[in-house]
Image (cartoon, helix red, strand yellow):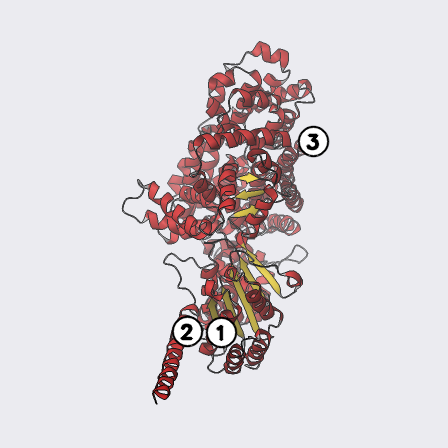
Amino acid sequence: MALMKTAAFNSDQKAWLSTLDQKVLSSWVALKSKAIELPEHFLARPELSQKLSQSKAITWLLAPAGYGKSVLLSDWYGQQVNSKDASNDTLGLWLTLDSKDNHEAFLLRHLLEAANKMVAGVATDALAHWLATMNQGSLDCEEVLLLFLDELASLNCPLIVVLDNVHEIEDPAAWQVIQSLMTQLPGNMRLLMASRFIPNALGRLRLDPRLEFIKQQDLAFDFQQVTAWLQQADIYDQQQAFNLMERMQGWPAGLGLWLLCRENASWPEDLGHEREQLADYLMGEVLSGLEPQLKEFLIRIAPLTSFNEILCNEVLGIEDSSRWIQQLVHHNLFIDSIDQRLGWFTLHPLLAELLCQYSSEQDREKTHLAAFHSLKQQGFRVEALQHARLGKLTQEAALWIESEVDRIIADLDFAAVLAWCDFVGSDIIASSARLQLMQIWSLLLTFQYAAVGRLINQLDTHQIEMHYPGQLLALRGFIARGEGDYGQARSLCELALRELPEDRFPIRVLMCSTLCNIELVSQKPENARLWNRLAIDIARQHQALSLEVFSLFDYARVEQYRGHLLRSAEVVDQGLELTLRLPQQARLFPHARLIIYRAFIRWLKGDIEGARQDAYIGINEANRCRDVIVLYGYSLLALIHIMKQEGKAALAIIAEAERLMQRWQVSEQVYKNWIDIVKANIWMALGKWNRAEECLDRVTKGDDPLGTNHAELFPMQSGLYRLSCARLLFQKKEYSNVIQLLDRVALKKQASIIQLSGTLFQAVAYALKGEVSKAKQVWQQGLKFAEQEKIKLDLSQFISISVSDLESAIGSMLTVTTVSQEPRHTDYKPGSKAELSAQSAVPVFIEASNLSVREQEVLGLIAEGYSNQGIADQLFISLHTVKTHARKINAKLGAKSRTQAIVKARERMII
């Protein structure tokens, strides 16, 4: 009897424990099957959500800790599964993996339980088989998974399965479950995974056409997103965005921690708290699980920032660096390969900063010293110079730099040169004429003429003329250019070219570039091209890739000036492709200016979003290498803001640009006139005509009536000044003066885009004077060029008269869509029926401006055949919003249907 009671008690206890286990398991799975909550400062990223929507059946998000993998998946998962659209029948299964899942039985059980939570009973058979085979002591994972996937396939509805933290699955048997899931994926199912690294070999799955990766470079914030994220937190500080971008490299978690610290009451004094928070995160999420030897290796190479096997071996005095580097790559420990430099890697600057805290200053200096010797032997001058400064090398580095001056100048990393010069001090620089020349050229090429004036007086001119023929002539020519004396500059630079020895090829290229740009300012593009061709030949002869790309930038400007916009775009793309062959740091200067110029070309072609993205990228890079061409980028962003009728934002952008020039100590004559002209156009957009006139008056304070002095950096400066003055005259209704200011002779030698703009301005002025026949003739000339070069220029933002005046004046003559069509002849008389009927015809450039940016996007998708719902999905807006935009488009185009709207838009060259 006692035995029976004991057996009964044991049976009851077993059942009770089993029930308890099931409750615990259910609670555990419930926690693991919840998508994570979006953080407080979440920034929606529709372009990535769209990429997820359009990606392949198996999509793997692969990036280190804190890159927003789970956040992105959670946001997208919620949109797909929790949509209120009645037609959406998508089911979702989310499972966050952890160390307990690193066992095949637990992983499979958790997956099945989560599926049952999604659809009751969908995993019943699979669970029964799991229990039966477990009780027999041998779990049959393949059969269990097969039963489960068959049930999922029979659901006859779309199914999304998300597995987060897949890097936890390192056990081979558990990994086999993941692989089987990938290979046997049902047709109605999408599998999305996120992990910090790939824990086991994928093998033949790498070749699976259904597999797609979204990696660190895709998930990192770009400069535009950092700016938007800051503005979302009411932080409108462009410089802060640059600083964060450079330090965080777009790392989302780092940005979040920074903002958390900023919201602390002690900010901004307590910056140590920020470092403490970042260090704690990296230690807890990245370094805590590393084996001691790998962590030690990381600490020792941290001062290098970028490295390869040879450098690590020589710096650390070991022979097996490759083994440790491979482990770092496998675990994806904030390490990235460097483009076009096989075997080279870089550490995230924040991780390097943290790791350096674990070594003494003396040890770090030894590392920099060893790196300097290794890198100069490998021919990496830019990096060697950086380690010379960080390792506090003076005399030894000075001797090497003296011998490499020409190549160092050819690398175009003037910011690094100036940083080293500041570090070593004036005594060491003054001890060597070559070092003095290197410093002066670096200052000249960053347009710090005041500093150059002080240093050039310290030169021993007799010694330089004796040992460095042509150098003084070159310096004086460059300085004359900076003073706006182009005649003197041309003579001196040509003399310098004749006297400079062949091995002084960097200065020879700079002289050719100077002469090229002087000829552009002098409105002689053919002469400019001759000097540019010589510069490219010299650069190629000496295999100086940076100088070749530098010269291609000039080439692109020449082609654009000549009116060959498409050829200019091709040259820019050619240069960008060449920059990929440059070392990472040496790439910045030429790449930044080409990207900014590509932004300008895209803007001319009507690709506003592409232009904005390029401008942000270029500005970010130009900030890091002190390239004054950054002003092009800022000006372009300001223009884009004007087009969106955001005048105050445009003023803020230009103010930031001006502060940057002051911080860089750029001489005022280089940028002041340009900024005043851009500011004038912003004030006009805001209707502040007196302020605009004040800006233009400042430009003409000197002897030059057209603001061409010191315009070498911006060859179109005089043309832009003319157009800006024409805008003021439009406002005053002085149309005859507009025509006189923009007469054919004055425009003929201007840059192509200035010619086009001036021609169209003239057409408007003629029409407003009532000279319709002349207006038509001039307008057709402009349209012909615009069509030939695929230019889509919205001039309505820059002709500051009322839309009704403009429409009534020239609407009737602008019904032509291409130059091959005959215009409709309508006699125009103020107040006549022709004038009234003309108001119903909207000119090309007014049309585009009346449609908002969003309306133009909607119109483009309508033309591509998208339904209203399809447009809503593409633009991530509601169906109601799409319909509202469609109604406004029809009203503005005078259309009664989609088809009619498309026809009218194409007639008027909007799409």
In this view, which residue lies farthest toward the top? Answer: 462
According to the picture, the residue beneath numbered tag 3 turns out to be 530
Rendering coords of residue 366 (x, y %): 50, 30
For label 1, count other residues whose C-alpha is less than 10 Å away and answer few (under 14), some (14-19) or many (20+).
Answer: many
Rendering coords of residue 668 (x, y %): 45, 29
Residue nearest the observer in this picture, 517 or 381: 381
According to the picture, the residue beneath numbered tag 2 turns out to be 25
Quarter residue 203 falls in? bottom right
For label 2, count other residues whose C-alpha is less than 10 Å away and answer few (under 14), some (14-19) or many (20+).
Answer: some
Q: Amino acid at mark 1?
A: Arg
In this rendering, the label closer to the viewer, 1 or 3: 1
Is 669 located above or below residue 874 in the figure? Answer: above
- Of label 2 and label 1, which has the lower sequence position? 2
Q: Amino acid at mark 3?
A: Leu
For label 3, count other residues whose C-alpha is less than 10 Å away and answer few (under 14), some (14-19) or many (20+).
Answer: some
Q: Image check: 45 left or right of 146?
A: left
Distance from the alpha carbon under mark 2 to that under mark 1: 9 Å
Residue nearest the observer in this picture, 190 or 618: 190
Distance from the alpha carbon under mark 2 to that under mark 3: 78 Å
- Of label 1 and label 3, which has the lower sequence position? 1
Tell me whether circle 2 and circle 1 mark residues in contact (CB < 8 Å). yes
According to the picture, the residue beneath numbered tag 1 turns out to be 109
Residue nearest the observer in this picture, 167 or 164: 167
